[in-house]
Amino acid sequence: MIYISYTFKISPLQPATEILIAELGYAGFESFVENEDGVTAYIQKSADNESILDDIFILKNDEFKISYIKEEIAQVNWNQEWEKNFNPIQVDDLVSIRAPFHPNPNLKYDIIIEPKMSFGTGHHETTHMMVQHLLTLDLKGKRVLDMGCGTGILAIFSEIRGANFIDAIDIDEWCYENTFDNLELNHCKKVDVYHGDASLLINKKYDVIIANINRNILLNDIKTYTNCLNKNGVLLLSGFYQEDIPLIDAEALKHQLKLELIIEKNNWVALKYFL
């Protein structure tokens, strides 16, 4: 699988970088690496086209100066790129998220991630907030779905926190394959991984559903998620901005979901609903 990288140089950096990443995510870009000059975004070559940036409105905003360089990047180079750019992080001084070549800081929970091209290293606000939500839940013996699993980090953490049965699903083949690698690194035995989308959720039931994707997919799939929730089940949603909450909440209310908690980080949000 071949990826295309778009390296954007941005001035001033904020809030243009956050807006650009959000718009590129809606356009189909899958992974982002921020740097001191801007951000590099990655998209599958098969999904790239000459008009891919036409609807990226931040590029037309005169308040920001944004230029970019486009190039093809081979999968085999990705691990080297992550070794240069992927720094370990900590969540609430309880969870460490690191690559295999980082030392273990000996926190309560330790997650090892070999991210390759997949989304979900904990660096992005949405993954970070989902980890925070999972820290508050009693997952012992629970059935969990990690929808749009990316690296598999949230499925892995669910097992570490005591979940007894976890499904991890992603539509991207790279994420699907990467999740298996990370399950092995973390010695996980209770996670089943599937390549696909919400159409796989037929006759499935869960106590907790995690969906860190993007606004439009979530709006389309909330009904399906609700149908898969056991009574008193929890739905965690992220991948969108604070201003998107009214749209998400309106759709959730249609399906008797009740909003219990909002976590916000740099205008990104993660919502906790219960049925």
Image: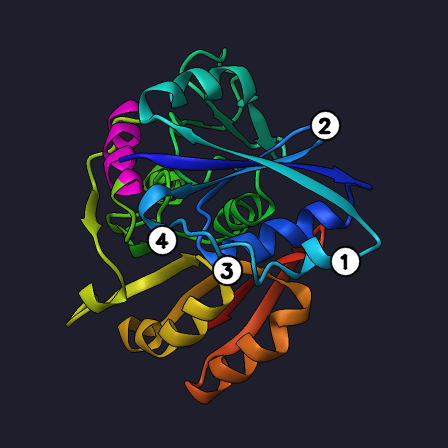
Which SS does the magenta portion mostly show?
helix
Q: Answer with mark 4 or mark 1, whichever residue precedes in sequence.
A: 1
The residue indicated by pointer 3 is: 26
Q: What residue is shown at x 44% (from left), y 20% (from top)?
A: 99
Numbered tag placed on residue 254 in the rendering: none
Q: Amino acid at mark 2?
A: Glu
* Mark in the foreground, 3 or 4: 3
Q: Position of residue 51 (x, y in %)?
A: 49, 57
Quadrant in which the C terminus is drawn? bottom left
Q: Nearer the viewer, residue 238 or 54?
A: 54
Q: Residue furthest left?
A: 203
User: From mark 3 to mark 4, how far is it between C-alphas?
Assistant: 14 Å
Q: Nearer the viewer, mark 2 or mark 1?
A: 1
Q: As shown in the figure, which amino acid type bears the numbered disc 1? A: Asn
As measured in the structure, the alpha-carbon distance from the residue carrying label 2 to the one carrying label 1 is 21 Å
The residue where tag 1 is placed is: 61
- 27 in the magenta segment: no
- Name the kind of residue labelled 4 in the image: Gly
Asked if residue 4 lies left or right of residue 33, the reply is left
Q: Are marks 3 and 2 in contact (CB under 8 Å)?
A: no
- Ranked by sequence position, the earlier of labels 4 and 2 is 2
Query: Is the residue 116 above or below the residue 261 in the image?
Result: above
Q: Is residue 274 above or below residue 176?
A: below
Please state which amino acid type lies under the numbered disc 3.
Tyr
